Amino acid sequence: MKHEKILRINELAKKQKTEGLTEEEKTEQAALRREYLDDFRKGVEAMLDGVVLKRPDGTLEPLKKKPVDPKALN
């Protein structure tokens, strides 16, 4: 995410605390936050994809993803 967008997120958060936001600004803030969280999750997932477990016998095993439980998302 570009630095300008992060600055805009912070600007909207500050304005929300002091003056309040218009409906248009609330929509913009929600979209920017979603984009930020999506980028953050992609970064963490990429980092975890590089994790390798070393077993006691010396073998290396890549970290496996757990299946997503749809009930846990609600």
Image: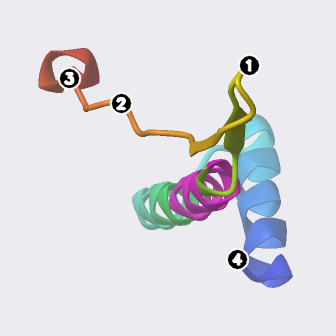
Name which residue lies at 64% across and 56% down. Answer: 40
In this view, the mark in front (2 or 3): 2
At 80% from the left and 40% from the top, the residue drawn is 18
Q: Is residue 70 magenta?
A: no
Q: Which of 46 and 41 lies nearest the eye of the viewer? A: 46
Q: Badge 3 is on which residue?
A: 69
The image shows residue 72, relative to residue 60, as above or below, that is above
Q: In the depicted view, which residue is nearer to us: 34 or 73?
A: 73
Residues 18 and 11: in front is 11
Mark before the other along the chain sequence, 3 or 1: 1
Q: Amino acid at mark 2?
A: Lys
Query: Circles 1 and 2: CB distance less than 8 Å?
Result: no
Relative to 32, say whether 16 is above or below: above
Q: Which mark is residue 1?
A: 4
Tell me which corner region of the image, top left, top right, bottom left or bottom right, holds residue 74: top left
The label nearer to you, 3 versus 4, is 3
State the separation of the CA atoms marked 2 and 3.
9 Å
Magenta highlight range: 36-48
Please determine whether, in this image, residue 49 is positioned above or below residue 74.
Answer: below
Task: Kindly report the distance in space between the C-alpha atoms of the residues bearing marks 2 and 4.
Answer: 27 Å
Residue type at mark 1 is Pro
Q: Earlier in the sequence, mark 1 or mark 4?
A: 4
Where is mark 1, residue-wise? 56
Q: Which residue is mark 2?
A: 66
Secondary structure, mark 3, is loop
